[in-house]
Image (cartoon, grey):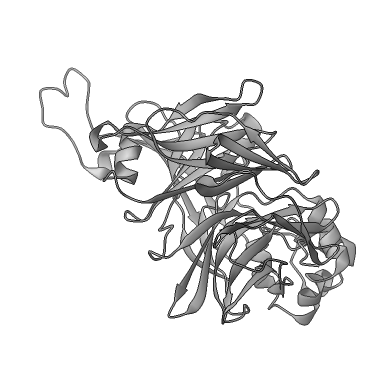
């Protein structure tokens, strides 16, 4: 896995008194840097009454040098700031080579997954550790690395994948040559696993993989094995996953809903969705329920994974809604994202949340006009929208940009780097995990 770009850098500036600059000088000498005491370089402007008459003195030799401590540091810290630091302990290889296995697992489990991926090539021991059950146990107990964006596309029929780490603000290239040579497309991701579906010749197939461990498996054929709308659901508590194939129209007949269970390794046939006219192929899985937009009947169709039955929710869409995307949030929150307005100059992007008690959509946010104009310059431009953990991502195909909105913090921000590698790129949220098993 190669790092292919960096995010925006952050700089920290020290606050000094007016017309003064704090400068620090560092020199790297192995592991013992020499630190020079900060100095204050006063500006050459002379503000005394006599100085206003004569010319301004800008000679560097006339600058007054005064030793001072940086603001914000306490006296104890400031007293040792200018002293040289000597390394008393050397990092000896033979000591670190004898590091206990459990302590090494504890350390590696807290390293960002993309950096661990590189460590597999250090030695055979580390490569085996990252696949060992004891390491996977430690890794499953530490907090998640945080959300990432996975971009998948094909370059000369070769699968390509890049992952943008939101915590590290860095793009990483993930090798995807381990997958079979199908004509497949990205379905989605959940709990560290990624699902694809496609055609192997004329046969419709589905596979699930873990990009970090480079492992994958092909799912058995469905009872009604036709191209379907799929969604992946991972249950980390029992280390299993399910794939839901919604009801679809094939020819002149409706296909029943099918659910694949990784524990049973087979598809189960469930109820046929009682609707004919779907409003959108976009789905959202929230709190063990799958939601779809429908026009007949108007509102939402909700599928319960626990009972295996469909239910209609009469939640009317907002007026003048041009295109709507369902986005799942945390704690049973369901969002509707879409454009409002008939004319391009009057359009705006808005976000609603479903009130489950009243079955109504309540507006919670609007995209600022400057972001909307930068993301979509034309009213007919295509865009995608998806979410995870109350984060909503917007991608514009023509502009090649990605915009992120944090529902909790109410903050809009651009994603550094190019989010879309080509016109056929497919994007989804992704949580990198070594302990996500395909079996």
**Observer able to see residue 430:** yes
* Left or right side of 425 for 41: left
Count of all numbered marks drawn on residues in the image:
0
Observer-nearest residue: 425 or 71?
Answer: 425
Q: Position of residue 438 (x, y in %)?
A: 76, 67
**Observer able to see residue 191:** no
Give me the residue at 50% from left, 47% from top: 280
The C terminus, quarter of image: bottom right
Q: Position of residue 426 (x, y in %)?
A: 49, 61
The residue furthest top is: 49
Observer-nearest residue: 43 or 111?
Answer: 111
Give me the residue at 22% from left, 30% from top: 45
Q: Quadrant of residue 133?
A: bottom right
212 above or below 392? Answer: below
* Left or right side of 127 for 174: left
Q: Position of residue 83 (x, y in %)?
A: 60, 47
The N terminus, quarter of image: bottom right
Observer-nearest residue: 212 or 322?
Answer: 322
Give me the residue at 80% from left, 69% from top: 96
Q: Quadrant of residue 128?
A: bottom right
The residue furthest front is: 252
């Amino acid at each position: 896995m190669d790092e292919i770009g960096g995010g925006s850098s952050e700089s920290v500036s020290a606050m000094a008194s007016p017309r003064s600059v704090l400068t620090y000088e560092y020199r790297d000498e192995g592991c013992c840097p020499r630190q020079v005491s900060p100095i204050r370089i006063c500006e050459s402007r002379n503000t005394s009454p006599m100085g206003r008459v004569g010319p301004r003195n800008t000679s560097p030799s006339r600058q007054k040098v005064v030793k001072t401590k940086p603001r914000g540091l306490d006296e104890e810290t400031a007293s040792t700031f200018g002293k040289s630091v000597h390394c008393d302990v050397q990092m000896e290889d033979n000591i670190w080579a004898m590091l206990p296995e459990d302590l090494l697992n504890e350390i590696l489990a807290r390293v960002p997954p993309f950096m661990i991926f590189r460590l597999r090539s250090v030695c055979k021991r580390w490569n085996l550790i990252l696949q060992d059950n004891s390491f996977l146990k430690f890794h499953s107990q530490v907090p998640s690395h945080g959300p990432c964006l996975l971009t998948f596309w094909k370059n000369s029929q070769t699968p390509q994948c890049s992952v943008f780490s939101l915590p590290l603000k860095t793009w990483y290239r993930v090798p995807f040559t381990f997958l079979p040579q199908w004509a497949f497309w990205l379905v989605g991701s959940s709990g560290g696993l990624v699902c694809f579906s496609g055609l192997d010749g004329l046969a419709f197939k589905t596979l699930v993989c873990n990009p970090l461990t480079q492992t994958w498996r092909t799912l058995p054929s469905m009872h009604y094995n036709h191209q379907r709308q799929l969604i992946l659901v991972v249950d980390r508590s029992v280390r299993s996953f399910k794939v839901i194939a919604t009801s679809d129209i094939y020819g002149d007949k409706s296909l029943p809903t099918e659910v694949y269970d990784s524990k049973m390794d087979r598809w189960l046939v469930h109820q046929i969705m009682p609707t004919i006219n779907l409003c959108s192929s976009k789905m959202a899985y929230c709190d063990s329920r799958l939601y779809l937009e429908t026009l007949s009947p108007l509102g939402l169709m909700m599928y319960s994974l626990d009972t295996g039955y469909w239910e209609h929710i009469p939640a009317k869409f907002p007026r003048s809604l041009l295109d709507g995307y369902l986005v799942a949030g945390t704690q049973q929150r369901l969002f509707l994202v879409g454009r409002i307005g008939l004319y391009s100059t009057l359009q705006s992007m808005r976000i609603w949340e479903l009130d489950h008690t009243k079955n109504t959509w309540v507006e919670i946010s609007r995209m600022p006009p400057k972001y909307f104009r930068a993301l979509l310059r034309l009213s007919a431009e295509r865009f995608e929208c998806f979410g995870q953990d109350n984060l909503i991502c917007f991608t514009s195909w023509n502009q090649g940009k990605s915009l992120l909105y944090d529902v909790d913090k109410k903050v809009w921000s651009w994603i550094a780097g190019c989010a879309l590698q080509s016109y056929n790129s497919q994007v989804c949220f992704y949580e990198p995990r070594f302990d996500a098993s395909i079996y």
